Each structure stands twice: as C-alpha cells, then as structure tokens.
Amino acid sequence: MLGFEVKLKELKEKALAACAPYFRRVEDVAECNTLKILNVMGECKVAAAHFNVTSGYAYDDIGRMKLDEVYAKVFRAERALVRNQFVSGTHALATVLFGILRPGDELLSLTGKPYDTMQTVIGYDNPSPGSLKEFGVGYLELPLREGRVDMEGLAEAITARTKMVLIQRSRGYSMRPSLTIEDIRQITAAVKQIKADCICFVDNCYGEFTATEEPIEAGADIMAGSLIKNPGGGLAPTGGYIVGRGELVELAATRLTAPGMGDELGASLISNRLFFQGLFLAPHVVAQAIKGAIFAAEIFSALGYKTFPLAADARGDIIQAVELGSPEKLKAFCRGIQQFSPVDSFATPEPWDMPGYADEVIMAAGTFVQGSSLELSADGPMRPPYRVYLQGGLTFEHAVLGIMGAAQALVEF
Ligand SMILES: *Cc1c(COP(=O)(O)O)cnc(C)c1O
C-alpha cells in the first residue's frame, strides 16, 4: 500500500503553508483565463453540433472550423489551425517553419540551442534527411547570456536575410528561466525595431495559460504548440495547434495539407468535444500543474536540493527542475513518481537511448495519454549534475502525492 512516513507528512504541511501565497497568484491567473475562454465560447456560440465527427474530405466541417475560431480568439490571433492530424508539438512547429521559410532564407534562434527535437528539424548538427538545412534554409543562433536573451547582441545577429526569429518560451532541458510575457514583449519590440518585417515565431510549448496574456498579444506573429500539453487540458488525445497572423497560418496550412487545400479539409475523426472541453479545462489543469511544481520546489529545497525555479519565482512554463547529483538518485526519483501513477505503476523506469538525444534519458510517465506531459511526469538525461525535470499533474492532489512519492524514494535511498 502506498503511504508516507510521519516526518515527510510534517514536511508536506510546512511546505504547503509556505506555498500558500504563491498558490493564490496561480489560482487568480486560472480564474482570469477561464473567464476569457467562457467569453470566447459564448461569443462563438459553441454548441453540441460542433462535437460531431466527420469523415472523408470533411469540407464544411463546422466543428473543426469552430475550434479554429475559438483558438484564434482565445489566443488573440487572426487565425488558427487546430488539428488532430498534427502528430505532436514538433510536427506543428515544423509545419510553421517549412510553411513559411524558403531556400536562401535564414532562421535565427534568439534563445540559444532549441529543444532537442527541433534541432533535428533544423538540421542542427548535420543536414538530417528532410531538415530545413537540406532544403537550403540557413540557421543561426544567438547564444543566451547568463540564461537570458542577449538583447545587446540582437542588432548584430539580425541581418537582411533573417526571415524569422525563433523564440522558445519554455526552459526545455536546461536551467535557464522560461520567458515571461513581458520578456517576449521586449524581445519582439526590439526585433521589429531592427527589422520590421522579421517574423517572430514563438515555440509556446508548456507556456499556454501560465499568464493572463499569450505571446501573440506580446507581439509574436505566429506560435505553435502541442495539444497533449497545456491547451489540451488533459482531455485532448493527440494533436497540435498554430495561431497567428492570417497569411502566415495560411502558409502553414498549405504545408500541413497541400497547396490549394489549406485548412479546408481534415476530418474530425474523434469528437471535437475533447478539444473544446480540454481547452475549457486547460487554465485549471495548468494551475494544478504549476501549484505542484511550486510545492516540489519548496519540498526539495527543504530536503537540501537545488531547485529551479524557486517556489517564489515567476513562471512562464510548467516545468520544475531539481538537481539530484547522482544517477542513483535520478533513478530513485523517477521510480517514486512512477509508483504513484494511475497507469503503469508497476513499471520500473530505466535509462534508455532515446532517438534524437545525445545521452541516455530516464522517464517516469504513467499517463492516460501516451507521452502527455501535462499529466504528472518526470525525465532527465543521465549526465552530471543529474537534473530531473518534473512537470504536470491533472489534479493538484496527484501532483502532491507523486512528489511525496519521489521525495520518499530519495529519503529511503
Ligand atoms: C514538448 C516541446 C516541443 C515539442 O515536443 P513534442 O514532444 O513533439 O510535442 C517543442 N518545444 C518545446 C520547448 C517543448 O517543450
């Protein structure tokens, strides 16, 4: 039977008390975003008829079209492309890149080395088959300065050939802080001042609903993300989204389907209810996950581990990093999370050679939707200083229990 030692329970009570003021902030954001979504869904007259499945070409699929309309309005964008046909977040992000960039254009990352899977899309180290590099699209990056975008280096990095800048909001597998909306506002303003027609593309994975505004409101031209992360609310079984300026989303749609077809085809093979309802739940579920992350920061700090961000810090994503210092502790942590999972609790996570990653990676994920990291999950590369990246939790109660499970595994170890 699962349970905890008395000492750990006492630690939990202390940590929860310390976190109370930070929780309050997160709950306020969730309420504000829920109101935003209610307003949009009302204005768009969302109705049961939009939840029907369709087949074939699915022309005039009113559910699909309504979902695009709702996403566009929630994210304050001109247009949206929300599809179960996106196989992952990487697919949605790649669709933006390949939809807009042409041979001879240059992509400039402003947030240093991009997320691991995006490196393969770009052709980062070598022109991987089908990568941007293979198509003759150039790639440059502006390294981070002390974990932040190098605002002084912008003017030199952006040239006449820079068609697009890539801004990754989340920390990914790194200790740099995630970008706040205010950070994004400053970055996009500075970029536009240097080159007015430079396209600001935000990788918004893990960032949705962590604040009351979204990157488009802060000057981004286009952004994309995964539906098995924040905006799917834990209900979306697959999919991705793109939102932004009309002509840019159109180009991406042309790449997702085919020239001339754009966003007018694509069957709703599963009920769109899961996407509408998931979006409605998303602000709350994101708040549950962030409260879990804050609790984890507090409790692992109390246990003597370096945590990033700290409980009191501002957050632009749902990720919590904890530096564990040894491979055994990293494995123990992941085992703890796995034991307290609703699915596959009997499995023991082991490090493995994941495609696209340089070091072995260990992952704990007992999720209902395979690989959904809005559900409680933890992972980390098997290299010093053995950091674990923890995220998600569909309910705060589960986040607390899983984190306690990981803490107990560390204490027992
Ligand atoms: C998750 C994520 C992606 C896309 O990953 P998928 O697993 O393909 O959904 C891209 N960028 C960042 C920062 C991410 O967190």
Image (tube, rainbow, N blue to C red):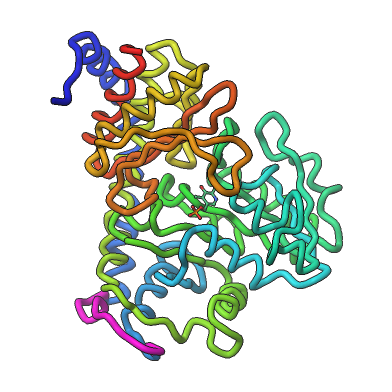
Indicate the quadrant where residue 164 lies. bottom right
Q: Position of residue 53 (x, y in %)?
A: 27, 80
Indicate the quadrant where residue 235 lies. bottom left
Magenta span: chief secondary structure: loop
Q: How many marks?
A: 0
Q: Classify 57 as above or below 201.
A: below
Residue name at image x 56 percent, y 44 percent: 182
Q: Please indicate, yes or no, whether residue 24 appears anywhere in the rendered image.
A: no
Which part of the image, by quadrant, shows the N terminus? top left
Residue name at image x 36 percent, y 25 percent: 296
Residue name at image x 34 percent, y 28 percent: 335
Q: Position of residue 4 (x, y in %)?
A: 19, 18
Q: Which residues are magenta?
A: 46-58
Of residues 6 and 33, the one nearer the viewer is 6
Q: Please indicate, yes or no, whether residue 80 appears anywhere in the rendered image.
A: yes
Q: Verify whether residue 55 appears in magenta.
A: yes
Q: Classify 208 as above or below 294.
A: below
Specify whether 191 is left or right of 333: right
Which part of the image, by quadrant, shows the C terminus? top left
Q: Position of residue 275 (x, y in %)?
A: 31, 65
Specify whether 271 is left or right of 304: left
